[in-house]
Amino acid sequence: MEPILAAIGLLHRLNGALLAVGRGIGMLAMAAMVVAILIQVFFRYVLGNALPWPDEAARFCMLWMTGLMAPTAFRVGGFVAIDTIEAILPGRAMQVLNFCLLCVTLVVLVIAAQIGWKEITGIGGRFATASLYVPLSLSFDEWYRVPRSWMMLSLFIGLLLLILVNIELLLRRLVAILQGEDQLPRISDIDMAGPE
Amino acid sequence: MLIWFLPVFLVLLMIGLPVFFALLAAPGALLWLNGQERDITLLYRNLYNGMDSFPLMAIPFFMLAGELMNRGGITLRLVEFSQALVGHLRGGLAHVNVLSSIMFAGLSGSAVADTSALGSMLIPAMEKQGYTRRFAAAITAASSVIGPIIPPSGIMIIYAYVMGESVAALFLAGIVPGVLIGLGLMFMVKLMADRYDFPTAGRSYTWRERGEAGLKAFFPLMTPVIILGGILGGVFTPTEAAAIAVFYAIIIGLFVTRSLTLGEMPNVLTRAGMTSAVVLLLVGAAMSFKTVVSLSHAPEQLAAFILSLTENPLILLFLINLLLFVVGMFLDAGPAIIILGPILGPVFVDLGVEPVHFAIIMCVNLTVGLATPPMGLVLFVAAAVSRERVSTIAVAILPFLAVEVIAIFLITFVPAISLTVPRLTGFLN
């Protein structure tokens, strides 16, 4: 049990730090999305001159917000599921079922991440975005067109974070099955809502 | 063989696999077993492309606007205005509860937000006036389902995106059904108030006082006018209207009600962002799932099966309502729409049901499911807010659920209830 608890301790700290950074960037991405669309509304309807970049920039931010914030939701049980069976099963059987479900989710995530990496490094990732540029110098006379792979990377990074969270949850469940739940570090609660 | 992904999917769902993973695992496994590995890559592409969407951005924006409205002290002004209008009636606070929900629905579009914001204010007030706690919690939960029916509505944006419908048409189609449910609930409150001698919420307000309360609620109540007016007038897209709603909510919270502080913004952004991230992943996975639904020809087979039961569309609509009601008891509205929309939508559209009408039937039915036991989400929220047991609220809510079931059947069998407003405004032919 000791090595598993040590691994959980490590993952707990690692995931805690990575996801906190993810939430911070995701929060800024959310704010940037709003600002980008408001700029577009102003230019389109007030000045009568639509800009080419805000819509794509906002989508860029939305994808990164999703990739970076979804793992936190997964860690605190924010992914929607029907838990009727779990609720009626006795304690140990519920833990075992939960462990098996986490094995399935891990397989899905690993396969998705493999495909994701191939997509990023494949033909699709070599195209450039339609309107996003970053400056290469402080004088703003050289610009680099953002490749589409930078957007695609959002889902891949999200999947990697989800894998890390999944492994932590899997080990936690294993310890629970071995009846050592009281030795596990507590995951702090984060308030979640829903589209309903 | 591919058709087996549906039973596999249902089994995975029933044993508790999160919907996002079940939407990917079941079709993925069957594609692999079928030797179609290349199509598994297609699943991934559709997951990504499904999320990379401008119209979908309305979801995080409306969620953020709802969060900002909740924190901005707007609830109190709506309740005060409702009290000025209907508080003098017998069962006044119960009427206030329903009327506030109708107004709140135009701001947030979330039943959970409605239950928690209005419940925390009105349940203790109702108890103080002599209502039982279970009744107060039940009417709060029952009226909160109006939230996702009257626009703006998160689940309607999801439906419109997944099924390729017009968000504006769905928003417009939801107005009358939402008000109908509200009026039905108020009628039930009146019947119960007369029978059980409910108290009034106090004195009758003068029209001048009502005008003053209305003035205080004016700015919050302008939100749906701006959103719908902008979309209908062709001024904004739904996504832009949602961003405007965020901006408007910030202005109201900071400068009109002065209940929102800049220090609260990180928390509000994080909460809305996390919730949106889960929904966006689900919608992306739904787009993958939809691809395999088409590849497997499941809708055609399902249509053949349904038509073998009966060819009468009215009976079929009755049966589908039963199915949706049962699904709604166990699954939240958003995921249920994501799963069932691509399967059932094409079948009923082929049978001649207007797509917008079917969308409203699904949305209303599954939203009412949020207040039905055993898994109704708002029942749990109402229980947490009122500190009453879920089972007790589940019994007390039955008269109101009966009203909502009648409303579902009216909406189902009288298409004009949903379709008149979008037709009159030219959003539907």
Image (cartoon, grey):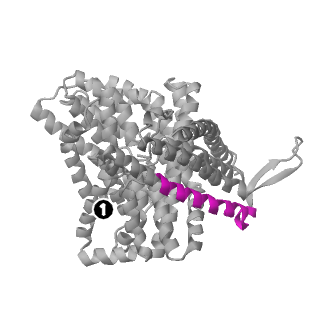
Relative image position of residue B303 (x, y in whole percent): 34, 75
Q: Quadrant of residue B413?
A: bottom left
- Residue B357: image quadrant is bottom left
Specify whether residue A74 is in view.
no
Residue A105 belongs to the span the image colors magenta:
yes
A39 or A152, which is in the foreground?
Answer: A152
Residue drawn at x 55%, y 24% is B261
**Observer-nearest residue: B124 or B176?**
B124
Label 1: few (<14), some (14–19) or many (≥20) C-alpha neighbours in 10 Å = some
- Chain under numbered label 1: B
Foreground of the two, B277 or A176: A176
Direction from residue A151 to residue B133 in the image, left or right: left
Percent position of residue A41, x then y: 63, 46
Please, what secondary structure does the residue beneath circle 1 have?
A: loop
Q: For this view, does B244 lie left or right of residue B7?
A: right
Which residue is found at the position 24% from the left and 75% from the top? B309
Residue B251 placement (x, y as % from top left) = 56, 31
- In depth, the one of B196 and B99 nearer the eye is B196
Highlighted magenta segment, given as a residue range: A102-126
Percent position (x, y) of residue B156? 43, 53
Q: Is residue A21 visible?
A: yes
Q: Is B401 placed left or right of B298 in the picture? A: left
Most common secondary structure along the magenta stretch: helix
Residue at 45% in and 75% down:
B2
User: Is B242 colored magenta in this rendering?
Assistant: no
State whether residue A135 is above or below residue B120.
below
**Amino acid type, label 1:** Pro
Position of the N terminus of chain B by quadrant: bottom left
Q: Which residue is mark 1?
A: B415
Question: The C terminus of chain B is located in which quarter?
Answer: bottom left
